[in-house]
Amino acid sequence: MKAAIYARYSSENQSEKSIDDQVRVCKKYCAEHELTVCDEHIYVDEALSGSLLNRPGLQALDKAAENKEFEAVLVDDLSRLSRSNHQMLTLVLKFNYLQVKIISVADGISTDDENSKLGIQMRGLINELYLDDLRKKTMRGLEGQKLRGFSAGENVYGYLSQPVGELRLNKRGQAKYDGKVHKINSEEAEIVRKIFQEFINGNSIHKIAAKLNEDKIPTKKHMNGGWNVSTVARILKAEKYIGTWDWRKYKNVRDPMTGKKRVVRRSAKDLVPIFREDLIIIDKETWEKTQKRWQELKGTCQ
C-alpha cells in the first residue's frame, strides 16, 4: 500500500529536529506494516501553527490525495494535522471521502477502523484544549512583561526597543535577556511631532504622506511604497504618543473557514490600563487639537 507522511512543528522556538523525529517514527511504522512511502510524498510544514489550514505542506498533501497518489497518510499524532478540533475533523472527513485513511502512530488510531470515531473525537478535543491553554499562558506571560515595564513585541514608529537585564542561555542555547524596554527614538519622534503639527495646520493626510516620501523619510519597516495614507492616519490616532500603552485593548479572531485573522476590540473588563509618562512624544494640547480636526473631517475626503 502506498503511503504519505505529514509532519509539522508549530513554533520558531521548537527544534527543526522535531520534523526528522516525526518522519522517523512514521517510516518505522511503515516498515512494520508493509507500507511504502516515497520521499516525494513526505510533506512538512515548519514553524506554522496547527490552527492554520493554509499551510503549504498540508495543501500539497491534500492535492496529492485528490490525485489518488497514495492510500494512507501517516502522522506522528493527530495534532500535527491540526490543533483545531473542527479543522481536524473536517480533514478526516475529506480524506475518508477520498478513500485515504489517516494513521496516527502515537495515538494508535487508524481512520479505517470503525471503532476509531470516539478516539478521534477525544484526541481532537484534547488537542484543542491544549491550544487554548497555551494561548492563555502566552497572554499571561506577555501581560506580566508589560506590567513589569517590558515590551511585548510592539514595533511602533517613534520608539526603539533595548534589551535589559542579565544575558542568559535558554533551553536551546540561545542568548536571551530578561526582556526589552521601549525608549523614545529621537529622530523618529521628531517626525511624529512634525506629522501632528502638519495635520493641525490643515494639511491633508495625502499631502503629509507625499511630503514624507519627497523628503525620503524611511518608514519603520522600510516599506517599498514608502509612506501612505493608512500609515500616517495610524500615527495620528495612536494613543501611545500621549503615554497610553493599555494592554488587552484588542484581540485577533480567526475565521474558522478561511483561517484569516481580523482585529476586534475587547470588552472594557479585559483592559489592563498602562500609562508611560517616559514615553510621551505628543503633549496633551496637540493631541486635543488633533482629535478636534478628526471630528471636523468626519464624512469628508481627507
Image: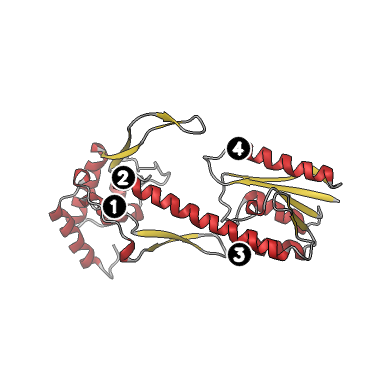
Q: Which residue is mark 3?
A: 86
Q: Which residue is mark 1?
A: 235
Give the Cα separation between the discs numbered 2 and 3.
39 Å
Give the Cα separation between the discs numbered 3 and 4.
27 Å
> Would residue 171 appear left or right of 17 to someone viewing this image?
left
Sequence-wise, the earlier of marks 2 and 4 is 4
Sequence-wise, the earlier of marks 3 and 4 is 4
For the question of whether residue 39 can be seen, the reply is no
Sequence-wise, the earlier of marks 2 and 3 is 3
Q: Are marks 1 and 3 in contact (CB under 8 Å)?
A: no
Q: Quadrant of residue 151?
A: top left
| Mark number, residue 157 | 2
Q: Are marks 3 and 4 in contact (CB under 8 Å)?
A: no
Give the Cα separation between the discs numbered 2 and 4.
33 Å
Give the Cα separation between the discs numbered 4 and 1.
38 Å
Give the answer, above or below, for where 300 lies relative to 235: below
Q: Secondary structure at mark 1?
A: helix
Q: Which residue is mark 4?
A: 16
Amino acid bearing label 1: Ile
